Image (cartoon, grey):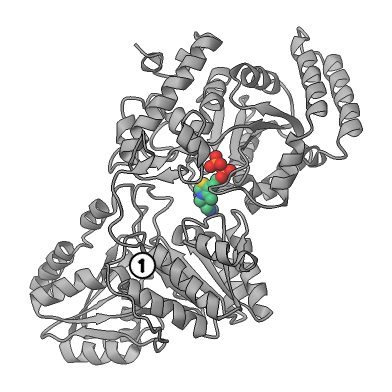
Amino acid sequence: MRYLDKINSPKDLKDLSIGELSHLASEIREEIISTVSKTGGHLAPNLGVVELTIALHYVLNTPRDKVIWDVGHQTYAHKLLTGRRKKFSTLRQHKGLSGFPRREESRYDAFGTGHSSTSISAALGMAKARDIKNEDYTVAAVIGDASFSGGMAFEALNQAGALGTNLLVILNDNEMSISKNVGALSIYLNKLMATPLYNRLRRRTQYLVRKTPVIGSRALKFARRFEEGLKNLFIPSIWFEELGFRYFGPVDGHNLTHLIETLEMVKKLEGPILVHIITKKGKGYRLAEKEPAKFHGLGPFDIKLGKAKEAKKRPTYTQVFGEILLKLARRDKRIVGITAAMEWGTGLEILRDEFPDRFFDVGIAEQHAVTFAAGLAVNGLKPVVAIYSTFLQRAYDQVLHDVCLQNLPVLFAIDRAGIVEGDGATHQGIFDIAYLSHIPNLILMAPKDENELCHMLYTGLKHNGPIALRYPKEEGRGVKLDRKLRALPIGKAEILRRGEGLVIFALGSLVYPALKVAEELNATLVNLRFAKPLDKKIITTLAKEYGKIIVVEEGILEGGVGTRVLELLEEEGLNNIKVKCIGLPNGFLEHGSRNILLSKYGLTSQGILKTIKKWLKSA
Ligand SMILES: Cc1ncc(C[n+]2csc(CCOP(=O)(O)OP(=O)(O)O)c2C)c(N)n1
C-alpha cells in the first residue's frame, strides 16, 4: 500500500520519517501526473511544490493554522493530503474537485483564489482578525515569484511591514511565471540566490537559533545582531528587511529536511517573516522540467510523449488573433502588443519573436498594462492589450479612467470571453459585456467567427479611440480568412437571414447556434457585431416590424446586451415589444467543460430553441 493511501488528513503525516515523507512526495507526483494526464490542469506548478506542501502540513497544525495559496493553481498536493484523495480523479470535471482552493470544498482551503497576488493581503487580514480576537495560530501565504510582482502583493507587504503582526510569507521562487518571469524584482531575486557565502553563513545563524533549547530572548537578540552584521557585510540591502520583514533563505524547496527545519524555526518567531524557497517548476517529470511553460497548464496528454491527447482540428481564435496582429504589425510600425504574463495564452508570442521591441510582457500586472498602454497611445503608438476577460476585471478603473476618459486609441483584445473550460468561477469570462458596455467612449465588438475577428481587429486599429473585441477560448469555425481586411462600420449590425414572425439578435460566439435556431423557426437573424454602440436603426425597425424579439449572448444577463436592447426600446418608447433575453444567470459559474456548461445554461442551439419555443407559448 502506498503511503499516500494512508493519509486521510495532515495528522497522518506526523508519524512519518523524513525518508517516508520523501517516498510520499514521489507518490504524490505520480498521482498528479497520472490524473492531470487524463483531466488536464496545472501540472508544472504543482510538481514544484510537493515537498513544500508536505512540509507545511507536517509542521503546521492545519486547518487551525491557515495556509493561503496564491492563485491556487498549485494546490493539488494540498488537496491530496487534506482528505480529497479519493475524489482526486474528478479534478476540474463538472461537479468534481475544483482546480483551485475553495472554502466550500474543504475547511483546509483557508481562502479561495484563482486570480494572482491576493494571498498576502488575505493572510494579513486573517492575521489581524486573529490578533483582535486574541487568538493564536500561524497564518501563512504561499506566493510564486511572478505573482509576487503583482501590485497587490506590494501593497500588502507595505502594510504588513508596518503593522508588524505575526505573518509568514513563503516566496516560492522558480524563476518562472507561465513563461520566464520578467521584471526588475525577478532580477533582484536572482541576485539574492547568487549570494552563496552570505547564505551559508546565514544558515549557520539559523542553525544556532534552532539549537538553542529554549528560544530565549537573549539568544534571539544575539542571533539577530549577528545576522544584521552579516547582512551589512555581504549584501548592501535585503529589500524585504527594509520593509519590516525578516528574511530567511534561499532554502532548497525540494529538501524536506531543510524545509521542515526552517518552518519549525520561523513559526516560533514574532513579526512578519519571509521565507524564500527555490524550487524547480515541473520537478520530477523530465518533460515538464525541460519545458515548464508548455506544462504549466494543459489538456489531457500522453505521459510518455508529453503530447496533447486530442490534436486541434482548427486554429483557435487566439491563434488567428496573434497571426493577424502580426500581419498588421508588419505594415504599421506604431502597433505594439502588451500582455500581462500571458504571451502564449493570448497568442502574442509570435509578435514577440518578430518584433521584440514592440512587445511588452509587463508581468502579472493588468492594471499597469492598461495604463502603460494609455501612455503609449498618448505618444502616438497603437497599443493592443491582450488580456483574458476575467483578468481585465482587475483593470476596470484603468480602462475607464486612464483610457476611456481621455478617449485614447487603445485596443483591448479580450480573450477567454464567455464560458471557460475547467477552471471554474474564478476564470469564467462572463462579466465583461456588463462591466465594459456602460463606459463612455468605449466600443465593444464580438466576432461571429475567426474571419470576422480579423476584420474587427483591423477595424479596431483604424479607429481613433478605445475599442475592445471579445472572443471565446475555442477553436475557430474553420472558415476561410479573407485576404483583404476591411474596416467594419462602427455600430452596424449584419442581417444574416430574413424570416417571418420573429427576430433573433445574437452576439459573437452565439451567432451560429442562433442561426441554426432561426433556420428551424424561419426567423430573422441579426449578427449584432457591436455590443456597444448598438445598431439602433436595425433593432428598432425590426422590433417594430415583428413585435417579438430575442437577444442571445454568452455573458451574464444583468447589464448585458439584452438589457441594453431593453433600455433602447424603452428610450424609443417601444414598450409594447415582447422581448426575451437569453444569456447566463448572474452568478458564479462552476467548473466543467464548455459543452457541458453551454448545454446546462441553455446556450446551445437546442437550448436556445427550447427556451424560445417555451417563451413563444406564453408570449
Ligand atoms: C490576475 C491574474 N493574471 C493572470 C493570471 C494567470 N496566471 C496563472 S498562474 C500564472 C503564473 C504564476 O507564476 P508564479 O506566481 O511564479 O507561480 P508558478 O506557476 O511559477 O508556481 C499566471 C500568469 C492569474 N491567475 N491571475
Task: Classify mark 1: helix, strand or loop.
Answer: loop
- Quarter-wise, where is residue 85 in the image? top left
Identity of the amino acid at label 1?
Answer: Glu
On the question of residue 81 being in view, the answer is no
- Residue 196: give x, y in percent of width and height: 78, 28
- Residue 168: give x, y in percent of width and height: 66, 31
User: Crowdedness of circle 1 by 10 Å Cα count: few (<14), some, many (20+)?
Assistant: some
On the question of residue 123 being in view, the answer is yes
The tally of labels here is 1
Q: Residue at x 45, y 42 (%)?
A: 295
- For residue 30, side relative to residue 134 (left or right): left
- For residue 535, side relative to residue 259 (left or right): left
- For residue 430, side relative to residue 366 (left or right): left
Q: Quadrant of the N terminus?
A: top left
- Quarter-wise, where is residue 419 in the image? bottom left
Viewer-closest of 66 and 477: 477
Q: Is residue 14 above or below residue 161?
A: above
Viewer-closest of 499 and 452: 452
Q: Residue at x 26, y 53 (%)?
A: 597
- Residue 535: give x, y in percent of width and height: 34, 87
